[in-house]
Image: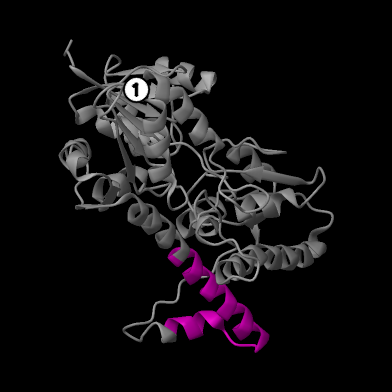
Amino acid sequence: MRSYKKTLSVIGLGYIGLPFLLSLTRTNFKLYGIDNNKGKIETLKNRKFFSEEANITKLYKRTLRDRITYSTDIIKSEVYILCLPTPINKKKVCDTKILDSVLNKLTPILKEKDLIIIESTVPIGYTNNILKKIKGKLSKVRNISVAYVCEKAMPGNTLYEMTNNDRIIGCANKDRIKLKKIYKTFVKGRIYFTDFKIAEAVKLVENTYRDFNIGLAHYLKNILNKKNLDHEKVFQLSNKHPRVNILKTSIGVGGHCLPVDPYFLDNKKNGLINKIRLINDNQTKICLKKLKLKLNAYKNNKICFWGLGYKTNSLDLRNSPALKIYNSFKGSKYFASEIKNDLKVKNFLSYKEAINKIKHHVLLNVSNKNEKKYFKNKIIIRI
C-alpha cells in the first residue's frame, strides 16, 4: 500500500463532488469522500455505485478500493473541498444553510495551514465573509486559507468538462502554488487566479449569460410564431451573420444552475434577470398547454413520456421542465420510461415494457438517434 503524508476531503458527493473526488486520485493526498447520505456511502464502500455517465462509472471501478475512504463523518484533513448544494428559497435568495452548517462543523477542527476550497455557487462576498468568521473564531490558529473555485461541469459530460475547461480561482497570493498543484493533477485547461469576489461573480455571470441567450431564443420564437413565421428558418438564416448565434429553443430551462444562479446576482421583481427567468419558465407552460391540446385526440389511449431529464441524454431531474410537464398529467393511463435506465417517478415502466405495450409516446428530451432506434412504427406525439 502506498502511504500518503497529506490528506484531502471532498465533502458532498453529488453530481460534482464524486467525479471531482475520483479525478483527484492522481494527487499525493490520502483521499476522503464525505456525504451525509448513509445509503450512498454504503453503495460507494461496497463497490456498487453506478453513474448514468459511463466514464464516471469506469473511473470509479478503476479506482483501487483503498485509494478513497468514504464516510458520513467529517475526517480531519489538510484540505477540504466543499461541493454542496446552494438552492434558492421562496424569496429567490441563495440558501447557504447546508454550506454554513458544514463550515461550522469544520471550524473547530481546523489547524495551521489547512485549506478550505469552496466549489459551491455562492453570492458575491460569501467567501470573504466566511474567512473572516473562521479567523474570528480561531484566535490561536493564524494561518488558515480559504479559496473559491468556479465549478466547471455539465451533467452528461462531467469528467470531460472538469478536465478540459479553464479554472478561475479566487484566493490569496500565498495559496496559489498549493492550489495549482491540486488542480493541475487533472485539469488540462488554464488556471487563472483572482480575488474572491471576482471568482464568485464569474460563475454567476457565466450562467446568467447562458440563461439570457436561451431566454432570447424563446422570446423571439414566440414573437415569430404569432406572426406565422417559421422561427427555425429565421434563426438558421440569421445565424449566417458572423456575429449572430441564436440558440435552439427547448421546452424550458432546467438543471441545478441556470434556473437558480442568476438570482444570486439580482432578484428584483422588475429586474432584467427576473424577466428573463419568467420567459424561460413560461416556455414550459406554453409547451404544456400545446401538449394538452394535442393529447385531447388520444383520450382513450395509454401514453408514455420519455426524456424526463432536464436536457437530452441526461437523467438529471433537478428543475427539469420535462418532469414538470409529465407530473402535470394525472391518471393511470399516463406512464414514464427511460431507455435502459430507471427513474423514481410515478407510473414508471421498464423501457422494454413501455415499447412493447404502448403505441403512443411523447418524446420530451430524446435524441434523434434513440428516436430512430426505439420508436419505429410508434405514434409519436410532439410538442
Q: Is residue 228 magenta?
A: yes
Residue found farthest to the front: 139
Q: Does 42 appear above or below 312?
A: above
Look at the image and give the residue range highlighted in magenta: 209-236
Picture quarter with the C terminus: bottom right
Q: Does 255 appear above or below 68?
A: below
The one nearer the camera, 144 or 31, is 144
**Is 248 positioned to the left or the right of 224 in the image?**
left
Report x, y in % for residue 284.
Answer: 65, 62
Residue type of the residue flagged with mark 1: Leu
Report x, y in % for residue 338.
Answer: 57, 43
Assign a secondary structure to mark 1. Answer: loop
Per the image, the residue denoted by label 1 is: 110
Picture quarter with the N terminus: top left
Q: Main secondary structure of the magenta part?
A: helix
- Which residue is depicted at the point 35% across and 25% down? 139
Q: Is residue 382 visible?
A: no
Report x, y in % for residue 97.
Answer: 56, 36
- Which residue is depicted at the point 33% across and 53% down? 199
The one nearer the camera, 26 or 112, is 112
Q: Is residue 245 magenta?
A: no
The one nearer the camera, 113 or 375, is 113
Q: Is residue 66 visible?
A: yes
**Is 372 positioned to the left or the right of 164 in the image?**
right
**Disc 1 packing (10 Å; few <14; some 14–19; many ≥20):** many
- Which residue is depicted at the point 64% across and 63% down? 281
Q: Does 351 appear above or below 252?
A: above
Report x, y in % for residue 376.
Answer: 56, 56
